[in-house]
Amino acid sequence: MTTLGFIGLGNMGGDMAKRLIDAGHDVLVWNRSPERAEALIDLGARVASSPSEALSAEVSFSMLANDAAVEDVLTNEAIRACGANSHVVMASISPTLSDRLSHSFEASGAKYVAAPVLGRPEVAAAGQLQILAAGDPKAVSDVTPYLEVLGKRVWQLGTKPSIANAVKIAVNYNIIHALQALGESIAMAERVGVNPSIFVDLLSSTLFGGVVYSGYGSLIAEQRYSPPGFTVALGRKDLALAEELARSTNLDLATLPALIGVFEEALARPELREGDWSAIAEVTRRQ
């Protein structure tokens, strides 16, 4: 039985760690809020005393909220504990940070893989995530059996880990456009008397099939923004990552300033800022 470490037991990480436990692995978990580990202990997980202990497992994973959280937890001291083992960062972080982590893990003799994911918490619980993996081919191959427990498909995107992070940013940028497009088009249909649920059904059943339009379209039509699967603040973080990536690749993203304005307004409204990121649709809808 392989001992696996798992750092970060939030909305996504907790379900992902559970998948690994259910697959029969010995899982050593750590979270900054220890109470998050309690349900997993009942399922057979062991609690690590520190990130370093979790990183000392044969293979370890982390699923943290943002760059700041990753830098706070994956310190150079903690990374040294990884030794010659493998670590997989599954968070949506900047390519710049991913490059730094890659160098730090390699300097300690460890193997580093970036594997951010596509999917909401319920998708993680079902093991149906789309996993975007990049890194040394041997390192990616070694961790793929565990990734296949977590996801429906593992996309191998390149040998440089930060490529996976860049692709995740590009995908999320596309989702944000869809959320705003849904908000604007639903608002237009509503104002001429069309039921928003019927309008979303029209979109998703004809020209715009797929989980973004059907899933988020239903949330927006029914204004079901709580509990959030992914918060407005995290969406704003992803826009900042897109801005950084565009700057580093000499791209001018014409719609970026408008989208930033929408997210800033949503964050300024108490009734929206704690909701799912699809709540940005209400900025246009409530004009």
Image: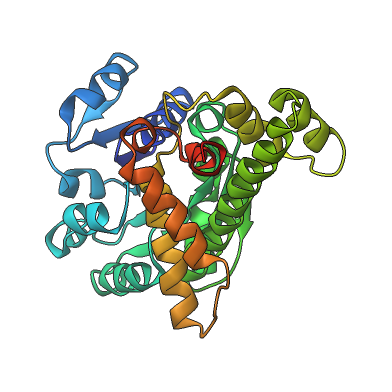
In this orientation, does residue 144 appear? yes
Image location (x, y in percent) of residue 130:
60, 45
Task: Identify whether 64 is placed above or below 20.
Answer: below
Residue nearest the observer in this picture, 150 or 283: 283
Task: Identify whether 159 is placed above or below 264.
Answer: below
Q: Residue at x 34, y 70 (%)?
A: 102
Image location (x, y in percent) of residue 64:
31, 46
Task: Identify whether 77 is placed above or below 125.
Answer: below
* Quarter holding residue 170: bottom right
Q: Quadrant of the N terminus?
A: top left
Q: Residue furthest right?
A: 206
Q: Is residue 51 left or right of residue 184?
A: left
Q: Residue furthest top?
A: 42
Q: Residue at x 31, y 34 (%)?
A: 270
Image location (x, y in percent) of residue 30:
22, 37
Residue nearest the observer in this picture, 104 or 116: 116
* Quarter holding residue 191: top right
